[in-house]
């Protein structure tokens, strides 16, 4: 597989971040990568299988092309399965960043061991095992390279395309994190440890993390962690944020936008602004649906819109898997025609623990989870909740999208002793904790006589 093939596949994964999956009643959008005049490259039908181990990788990010392609295929499979689980329980519009979710969960995966690790590996489609970390680092480097583009007409740098991906790690002060684990996150995710006073000021730390997310997403995601998401038992919060804003390669003329009728999934009709354009771009007619690709300025990232046959949306959505999606990408070819597309803007806020448990990873959310690779010695935290918030806006000029994911990890509540009243004779000592040296020893048998001089 040459570099162009891999960039096409990584572009598909990038567009999964940016375009997401929208279930709006009669159609949904998924990632795409073909330029208006190019024939898409073949997608992989077989990928190498890596053996997962309990030892975290180390060193500088390094990944080959086949691994990057396998990462794209695995993430697409996870994205579509998660989309189906969430859509089945909601029924409304939906927008996700499977890339953000996958990156945020890859960070605790690096510290998972035993059954906890295996369930995460299978559910999140981390078929690369430990190599998922350098692969994600390599993909982020590819995405970072998209951050600056040039005007297609005069070659000048423009702000027509923005893409930023950042990660952060917030850890409880004095928690015994493994130095190897922290080094892995720094090497592959650029996530240095931020000390957090979760025990003393959980609400203040919640607000601080939310402000970091807001800053990283141009204020589109401003309240990722809801009240009470952080408690004194929280030990670690792993966050990813992504922001995207890009102009269409071929913009719609606002003067051509006119009110039109949109028929929702339940059959109700509403009047919405419909953009119109006659354009030449990539198009495919496949069994059960039609697809059209709209590239953004720069050509590396695009939105692929899938329109299932009338009355067949739910059946098509439920049967759409990674193989079929990549097959549609392969079918996209140069064509011309009239396009009518509604403008839309909405936000999706979800908590993912139930869906992820149903998909095959309940153990990471239980107090018996094994994340011992995160800490020195025995023990380790478990995942309390995964919070995800995504925003999308599509109009005549282009698309703005933002998303953030936070994995909140906690310790079990310590044993409760009820009330302990020292209202009878007691002993006490003062010790040096590191050496157990007893510096002072005493007893109180008459507290009344031990109140000092007046």
Image (cartoon, rainbow, N blue to C red):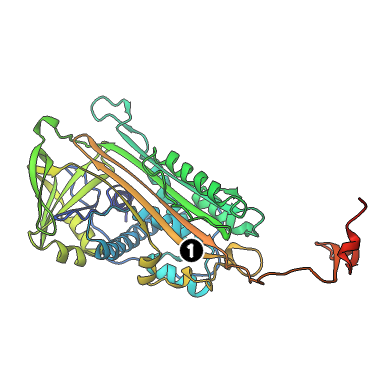
Q: Residue furthest right?
A: 453
Query: Splitting the image into 4 quarters, where does residue 163 fall?
Result: top left
Residue 60 seen in render: no
Location of residue 377 with respect to 18 vertically, above or below = below
Q: Nearer the viewer, residue 143 or 355?
A: 355
- Give the mark count: 1
Percent position (x, y) of residue 376? 65, 64
**Residue 159, image x, y percentages:** 33, 30
Q: In this picture, is 389 found above or below 383?
A: above
Judging from the image, what secondary structure is the residue with disc 1 in?
strand
Q: Position of residue 425 (x, y in %)?
A: 85, 71
From the image, tell me which residue sits under label 1: 384
Few, some or many C-alpha atoms within 10 Å of disc 1 (few <14, some 14-19, many ≥20)? many
Instruction: Say which quarter of the image contains residue 361.
Output: bottom left
Between 116 and 219, the residue placed more toward the observer is 219
- In this rendering, would 426 be left or right of 188? right
Residue located at (29% from left, 62% from top): 86
Left or right: residue 202 versus residue 119 is right
Q: Is residue 120 left or right of residue 367?
A: left
Which residue is at a point 27% across and 65% down the rendered structure image? 89
| Quarter of the image that includes the N terminus | bottom left
Relative image position of residue 343 (x, y in whole percent): 18, 41
Q: Residue at x 28, y 43 (%)?
A: 300
Residue 82: tell me if it is visible: yes
């Amino acid at each position: 597989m040459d570099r162009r093939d891999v960039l096409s596949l990584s572009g598909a994964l990038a567009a999964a971040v940016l375009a997401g999956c929208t279930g709006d009643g009669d159609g949904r959008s998924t990632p795409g990568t073909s330029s208006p005049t190019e024939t898409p490259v073949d997608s992989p039908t077989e990928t190498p299988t890596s053996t997962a181990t309990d030892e975290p990788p180390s060193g500088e990010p390094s990944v080959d092309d086949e691994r990057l392609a396998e990462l794209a295929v695995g993430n697409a499979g996870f994205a579509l399965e998660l989309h189906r689980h969430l859509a089945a329980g909601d029924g409304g519009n939906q927008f996700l960043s499977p890339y953000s979710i996958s990156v945020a969960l890859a960070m605790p995966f690096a510290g998972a061991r035993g059954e906890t690790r295996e369930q995460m590996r299978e559910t999140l489609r981390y078929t690369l095992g430990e190599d998922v970390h350098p692969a994600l680092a390599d993909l982020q480097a590819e995405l970072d390279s998209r951050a600056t583009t040039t005007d297609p007409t005069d070659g000048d740098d423009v702000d027509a395309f923005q893409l930023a991906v950042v990660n952060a790690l917030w850890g409880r002060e004095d928690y015994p994190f493994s130095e190897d684990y922290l080094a892995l996150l720094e090497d592959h995710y650029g996530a240095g440890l931020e000390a957090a006073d979760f025990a003393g000021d959980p609400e203040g730390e919640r607000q601080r993390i939310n402000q970091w997310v807001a800053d990283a997403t141009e204020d589109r995601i401003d309240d990722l962690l809801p009240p009470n998401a952080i408690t004194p038992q929280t030990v670690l919060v792993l966050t990813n944020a992504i922001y995207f804003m890009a102009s269409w390669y071929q913009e719609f003329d606002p003067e051509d936008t006119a009110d039109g009728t949109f028929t929702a999934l339940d059959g109700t009709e509403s009047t919405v602004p419909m953009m119109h354009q006659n354009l030449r771009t990539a198009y495919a007619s496949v069994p059960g649906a039609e697809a059209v690709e709209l590239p953004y300025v720069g050509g590396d990232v695009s939105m692929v819109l899938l329109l299932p046959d009338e009355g067949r949306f739910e059946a098509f959505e439920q049967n759409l898997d990674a193989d079929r999606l990549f097959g549609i990408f392969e079918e996209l070819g140069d064509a011309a025609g009239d396009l009518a597309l509604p403008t839309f803007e909405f936000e999706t806020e979800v908590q993912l623990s139930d869906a992820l448990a149903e998909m095959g990873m309940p153990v990471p959310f239980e107090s018996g989870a094994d994340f011992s690779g995160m800490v020195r010695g025995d023990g380790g935290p478990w995942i309390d909740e995964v919070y995800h918030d995504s925003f999308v806006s599509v109009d005549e000029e282009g698309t703005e999208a933002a998303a953030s994911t936070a994995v909140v990890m906690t310790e079990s509540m310590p044993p409760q002793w009820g009330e302990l009243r020292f209202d009878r004779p007691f002993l006490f000592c003062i010790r040096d904790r590191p050496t157990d040296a007893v510096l002072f020893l005493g007893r109180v048998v008459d507290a009344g006589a031990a109140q000092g001089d007046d």
